[in-house]
Image (cartoon, grey):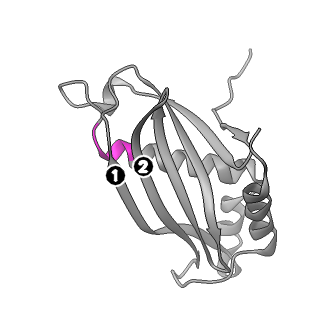
Amino acid sequence: MVNPTPPGGVFDGSRHLYAVRVYYEDTDLSGITYHANYLRWFERARSDLLRMLQIDQRAEIEAGAEGGAYAVSEINLKYLRPAKLDDDVVIETTCTELGAASCRMHQIAWRGDEKLCEATLRVGYISLEGRPKRQPAPWRAAFQSFMDQEAS
């Protein structure tokens, strides 16, 4: 038996691209994507970006008191056009600023060359008690490497 693997996206220089499809469950009765689903799609894209950067959040959480995790501390969404049932949407993620305990990111939901929704956000690294702390050095290095890539 062949087992499919979940999508992870692809790197295009300093952009991570993650594909989603608008399913019936994502829409309201008119076939328009419910606004909160953009948040879900953006979160999935960021999660898969971390996996592709070899950032193992689960292991860090399971490390106990020494561990930590990323959490969104700020987000601003701008809705531009509606995604509709059966649309293929690509989530583009870039890291725009890297700090000791956080990074700022920019995400765009695209349908072809149409920008549907745009998010600017800050993701902070926090202890399991919820306090800000420095990101692990290898994780910062992975983000820096991602930011430094040239577009192909």
Residue 59 x/y as whole percent: 72, 62
Examine the residues drawn in magenta and state their main secondary structure: helix
- Say which quadrant the C terminus sits in: top right
58 to the left or right of 24: right
Which residue is at 61% across, 53% downward? 94
What mark, if any, has residue 78 been given in the picture? Answer: 1
Which residue is at 72% across, 41% downward? 11
Query: Which class describes the residues within 10 Å of circle 2: few (<14), some (14-19), or many (20+)?
Result: some
Give the Cα separation between the discs numbered 2 and 1: 5 Å
Residue located beneath label 2 in the image: 118
Q: Is residue 37 magenta?
A: yes
What mark, if any, has residue 48 been given in the picture? Answer: none
Magenta span: 34-38
Query: Which class describes the residues within 10 Å of circle 1: few (<14), some (14-19), or many (20+)?
Result: few
Residue 66 x/y as whole percent: 70, 81
Residue type (three-letter) at the residue carrying disc 2: Glu
Residue toward you, 58 or 20 = 20
Residue type (three-letter) at the residue carrying disc 1: Lys
30 to the left or right of 27: left
Residue toward you, 143 or 8 = 143
